[in-house]
Amino acid sequence: MLQFEGSHVHPDPKVGIPLYGPRSHNSPRHKSEIHVGFIGPAEAVEWARKFYEQCSDGVSGSKEHPPFPGCHSDRGFRCELRFNPAVIEPLTRQECLEISRQQKSRQRFELLLALSKSKMEILTQKDHPLDCIVFAIPEEIYQECRACEYVEKGRGSVHRDFRRAFKALAMTFLKPTQILRETTAGAVVSSSRELDHPSRIAWNLFTGLYFKVDGLPWGPTGLSPATCFIGISFFRPLGSQSSLRTSVVSHK
């Protein structure tokens, strides 16, 4: 059983949130407004904004997929998304062309990452509320820069993933991020990518957004006060063949 607002419980978040609201509603962790900033070409940003607005009004389900209730003060996660034109950093056509002109995948990857850094830096220095940054990335640029592999002296073979690199970069600015592809937002149709049901996409996107801005969608119930879950993962640092490190997360 999971706990939602008002100590109500239910085993399914997709029932509990529409019925009762998220666990942190009416607590200091809940934001009644979530201010979303954007990086990306003007057309892609406009598609992304419309996509968020449409999902906020609710998304129909199917026999296999529960409907998404939307996200407004009276439904779903009980908050309002705010979009301010002043909190947009465009990825210009010239910048997109410059990325595509690079001959090597590493050059394209590092140029896009450098541009992302400069635009996040500008966004986070603006005198406007900002809770989350969405990168509305063009599909062509995403395909060109999604990953790169190269050999570096002293480090051996290196594999880099843009999503991971972008999120690691964003940590220095203390702002959560979301990469939103044009295919997800419906701006581009891809024959090579099979999308989830629209309601499932909305559930995943908004649950992630609410949690990223410090909201608590649901919580455990029926556990003793001394209970603590610890998750441990093992990984090798980027480019290292001999070192093994651990990462730990806990939840009380």
Image: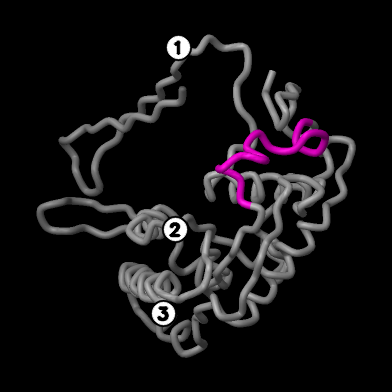
Please give the name of the residue rendered at 12% of the width and 58% of the height, measured from the top-left corner: 153
Res 226 label = 1
Q: Are marks 2 and 3 in contact (CB under 8 Å)?
A: no
**Helix, strand or loop for disc 2:** loop
Q: Position of residue 178 (x, y in %)?
A: 54, 58
Q: Amino acid at mark 1?
A: Ala
In front: label 2 or label 3: 2
Work out whether residue 235 can be spotted: yes
Above or below 156: residue 251 = above
**Label 3 to label 1: alpha-carbon separation:** 52 Å
Above or below 65: residue 7 = above
Above or below 186: residue 94 = below
**Label 2 to label 3: alpha-carbon separation:** 25 Å
Q: Which residues are magenta?
A: 16-31
Q: Position of residue 158 (x, y in %)?
A: 26, 53
Quadrant of image for the N terminus: top right
Give the quarter of the image for residue 188.
bottom right
Sequence-first disc among 3 and 1: 3
Above or below 84: residue 149 = above
* Magenta stretch secondary structure, dominant: loop
Q: Is residue 235 left or right of residue 129?
A: left
Give the quarter of the image for residue 192.
bottom right
Residue 22 within the segment the image draws in magenta: yes
Sequence-first disc among 2 and 1: 2
Res 175 label = 2
**Helix, strand or loop for disc 3:** helix
Please give the name of the residue rendered at 44% of the width and 17% of the height, measured from the top-left corner: 228
